[in-house]
Image (tube, grey):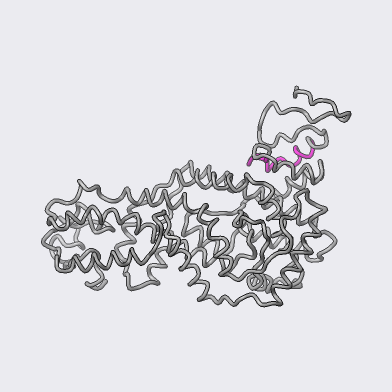
Amino acid sequence: MSDENLPFGFTPRDPDDEGGSGSDGPGGGTPNPFAFGAGGFDPSNLDMSQLGAAMQQLGAMLQSGGGDGSAVNWTLAHDTARGLVAQQGDPSVNATERREVEQALDLASLWLDPVTSFPATTSGGGAWSRSEWIEATLPSWRRVVEPVAERVNESMSGMMPAAGALPEGLPPELAQMAGPLLGMARQMGSMMFGAQLGQGLGALAGEVLGAADVGIPLTDDGRAALLPRNIAAFGEGLGVDPEQVRLYLALRESVSQRLFVHVPWLRSQLTAAVEAYAAGIHVDADRIQEAAQGIDPNNPEQIQEILASGVFVPDDTPEQVAALARLETLLALVEGWVDDVVTQASADRLPAADALRETMRRRRATGGPAEHTFATLVGLEMRPRRLREAASLWQAVREARGAEARDALWDHPDLLPAAEDLDAAEYITAVGRRRAPLDLSGLVDLPEAPSEDGGSPAPEA
């Protein structure tokens, strides 16, 4: 790192000098990433003539970063994501692509009506470019990511020394600046999170196939949308007619939107699972300090590599593992239900339906490169690991009780199967044939189903 890029106006010392930052003697040890700390600070090493210019540079950087005081600098996240998409190439959707997508979504809606009790959300549909996906989904990503970012920022702020714990011997001028400087930590953390989130969203925009492709509700209006350029890239090498690929994905997109619109509690349950995960976050300070030592502000590629390495990803606690398990179960139930409904709708209509079904199962269960990048940057995986078990469960319920009873399990979160129920397809089928209540969540004292003559339900024995 060149002298002019050293933080806060510190002048370098020769690592071979006694007490220098490269020694293990007095004054050695791991530097504090914020340039303050009890180990190794020597006031005589401070060049006050450089301090004012350094502070002005830092202030200008923070001011130019925008932001609204939240845990993530969303202006920076937006601009970073759009910039990455522009580098990858993002031509506008042409008239032919738009017409093909709209026709596929219209036909998908007709095929879905007989196989699910959830009605269509809106007429028609849309075709998006990658940039349009970013613009349309960024507000929802804010709801998902903000709790995680807030806890990471709080944890990182805890690494900063308190005002009363500053090193002895600080010049009065620097001591006066210390308070405001420490207060900048949150804004710097917000910029850091905004930059890494923008990278993750930019990478995702190059792979997502539709508005509901990641398995969580990212739009509020229920309007189905597909990304034709990404779909074309996805279909390459599958050996399947592009029209079948587009129609199969239109079925998945349309039915996902029906579920998200007609199950209003689903969004809040997903958010609650993310918040439960975020509640136990703590950051490995040693890992961040180690990475910060080698950062060169003039080398953007190096900074991107450090962000992508997962250095700012918090370590999972047992509580977070449990929260992630609940989130994965809910995502698996969503994906499994979509899988079952689309299988019904495409049966005897799409010759390549089985092959496309298996391709999508593997894609959603394992995640693509961009999903892995996003998980590394944010520390949160949005993958339904038990998709196959969930799909088998929904199929068993449908075969035993019908599609309407299957869809009715979304009436309340307590009716949904729990993680342990995903292995109980045979039990659920047997219960359904007895016309007993589907006690899928481990609840007790549920009433029996009404008798065939329409009498009042009797209490369970």
Up the image or down, 56 lies above or below 313; here it is below
Q: Quadrant of residue 248?
A: bottom right
- Residue 332 is situated, as x and y percent measured from the top left of the image, at 64, 49
- Above or below, 4 relative to 263: below
Position of the N terminus, as image quadrant, is: bottom left
Q: Residue furthest right?
A: 453
Instruction: Give the residue drawn at x 51%, y 57%.
Output: 375
Q: Does the magenta stretch include residue 428?
A: yes
Name which quarter of the figure residue 435 lies in: top right
Residue at the spot x=69%, y=55% of the render? 256
Q: Quadrant of residue 416?
A: top right
Residue 191 image offset from top left, x and y in percent: 39, 61
Nearest to the observer: residue 267 or residue 438: 267
Between 301 and 47, which is closer to the camera in this rendering? Answer: 47
Q: Which residue is drawn at 49% across and 54% down?
A: 145
Left or right, residue 243 beside residue 309: right
Q: Which segment is the magenta one? A: 416-430
| One can see residue 308 in this view | no
Magenta region includes residue 62: no
Characterize the magenta stretch by its predominant secondary structure: helix
Q: Which of 335 and 187 is in front in this view?
A: 187
Q: In which quarter of the image is the C terminus?
A: top right
Q: How many marks?
A: 0
Which residue does the image show at 73% across and 45% down from the upper left? 393
Spot occupied by residue 62 in the image (x, y as percentages of width and height): 33, 63
Please say if 38 is above or below 253: above
Residue 261 in view, yes or no: yes
Q: Where is residue 428 in the image (x, y as percent from the top left)?
A: 75, 38
Tell me if 386 is positioned left or right of 14 in this view: right
